[in-house]
Amino acid sequence: GGEETPPAAAAVEGAGQGQAGSDAPAAAQDAVFYDLPSLLVNLATDGSRTTYLRVAATLELVSSNDVADVRKQGQAITDGFQAFLREMRPSDLSGSGGLMRLKEELLVRANTILGREAVRNVLFTEFLVQ
């Protein structure tokens, strides 16, 4: 597309608080998120029919201090995710168990690329297999 916007990084203060003095955990109050670009990959299939996965993810970072490093390594993280996702079979992604394993694998890959535990969670904002 013609629109080139950098991935957004946003700190969310007091997310989900319905009232002052909420008992929300500190981690939720200080959550920092970094949006990765949407990916479209063809999955590994042994049949003649091509199966595609479109996925968009947001990284939940441990600290706002990690945003600069994630931004600097964003292309490497995206490349690592793409290489891994292309090896997946549609059956690997079925059910909630498959989705949880995928999230764990992507989390490990992101932190490996960054060289430390900077990413707390991988959150899918779009997930489509067709």
Image (cartoon, rainbow, N blue to C red):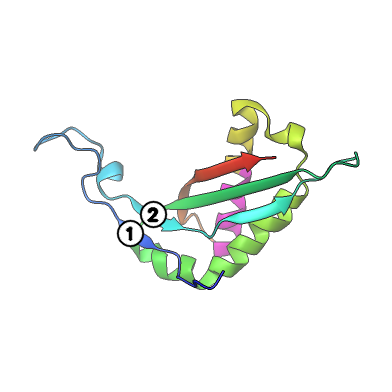
Q: For the C terminus, give its image quadrant.
A: top right
Q: Seen in the image, is 16 located left or right of residue 109?
A: left
Q: Secondary structure beneath disc 2? A: strand
Magenta span covers which residues? Answer: 105-115
Tell me, yes or no, whether the two marked residues, 1 and 2, touch with CB atoms within 8 Å: yes
Residue type, mark 2 in image: Phe
Q: Quadrant of residue 92?
A: top right
Please say whether residue 110 is one of the residues in the magenta stretch.
yes
Instruction: Report the residue at 45% width, 65% height from top.
Output: 7
The front one of 3 and 86 is 3
Instruction: Report the residue at 51% width, 44% height from top.
Output: 124
Vertical side of 128 occupied by 62: above or below:
below
Instruction: Report the residue at 29% width, 42% height from top.
Output: 28
- Image coordinates for residue 129, horizontal then vertical, percent: 67, 39
The front one of 86 and 130 is 130
- How many discs appear? 2
Vertical side of 91 occupied by 27: above or below:
below
Q: Which residue is mark 1?
A: 10
The front one of 51 and 77 is 51
Report the predominant secondary structure element of the magenta stretch: helix
Q: Which residue is mark 2?
A: 33
